[in-house]
Image (cartoon, rainbow, N blue to C red):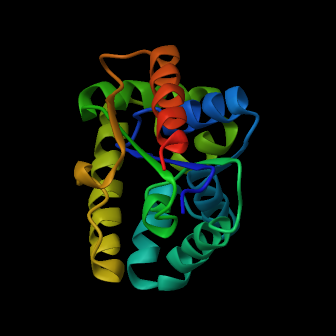
Amino acid sequence: MKKEIITICGDLGSGKSSTAKEVAQALGFKHFSSGDFFRQVGLELGLSVTETNKRAEVDPKIDEMTDQKMRDLNNSEKIVIDSRLAFHWIPNSFKVYLDLSPDIAKERILNSIRENKLREQSEQVKTSEEVLKKMTERFLSEQKRYWDLYKINNTEKKQFNLVIDTNKNNLSQVVKMILSEYKKWIAEN
C-alpha cells in the first residue's frame, strides 16, 4: 500500500535537502534529513562527516542509528525524507533520485557549507578541490558500507519512481516535477 511519504536520494550535492524542504513545504508535510542526523552524530563524536563515514566502516552502530531512524519513519505519513537509503527502508514511498555530476556538485557543496554552520563544522573544507576529494572519499565509503551491510547500490536508478538531472533543472523546476509525478503516483491504484 502506497504511503504519503516521499524519499529523495541522489548524488552528493544534487540538492536533496533543498528539494526535500521545498516539496515538504508545498505539500504541508514534515521534513527529515538523514544527512543532518548523521552529521550531528559525527559532531557528538567529535568527528567531521568524512571521519564519521570512515568510523562507520568499522563501527556499524553509526549506520545502525541512522538506518533505525529511517525504519522508524516508515510508520509516518505526510513526510519528505532526504536520505541515501530511505527508499530502501520505506519501499512504499514515492522514490526520487536527483542526479548531478561531481564537477558541478563540488561548487554547490562548497556554497552550502559556507551558508550552513552544521555543514561547516562537520565538513571542514575550504576549496572546491578539497570538497571533491572529500566527496569522493565519502561516496566510496558509503557505497562500500551500503553494499557490505545490505547489498544495496543506491545509485542504481531503476529503483526509483522518478530520476531528475538537477543540472538541467533548477530547484523550482525539480520541485514542480516531483509534485506533479507524486500526485499522479499517489492517485493511481
Res. 122 visible in picture:
yes
Query: Residue at horizontal 35%, vertical 81%?
Result: 149
Residue 36 image offset from top left, x and y in percent? 63, 51
Res. 113 visible in picture:
no
Query: Residue at horizontal 56%, vertical 38%?
Result: 17
Q: Is residue 27 left or right of residue 140?
A: right
Along the line of sight, which residue is nearer the eye, 21 or 145? Answer: 21
Q: Is residue 98 left or right of residue 114?
A: left
Q: Where 58 sits versus 74, above or below?
A: below
Tally of marks = 0
Along the line of sight, which residue is nearer the eye, 107 or 14? Answer: 14
Residue 92 image offset from top left, x and y in percent? 50, 61
Quadrant into which the N terminus falls: bottom right
Residue 126 image offset from top left, x and y in percent? 46, 33
Residue 11, quarter of the rendered image: top left
Q: Is residue 69 left or right of residue 99?
A: right
Query: Residue at horizontal 30%, vertical 39%?
Result: 132
Residue 116, quarter of the rendered image: top right
Q: Where 161 sits versus 175, above or below?
A: below
Q: Residue furthest front?
A: 189
Along the line of sight, which residue is nearer the eye, 31 or 161? Answer: 161
Residue 125 image offset from top left, x and y in percent? 46, 40
Along the line of sight, which residue is nearer the eye, 156 or 141? Answer: 156
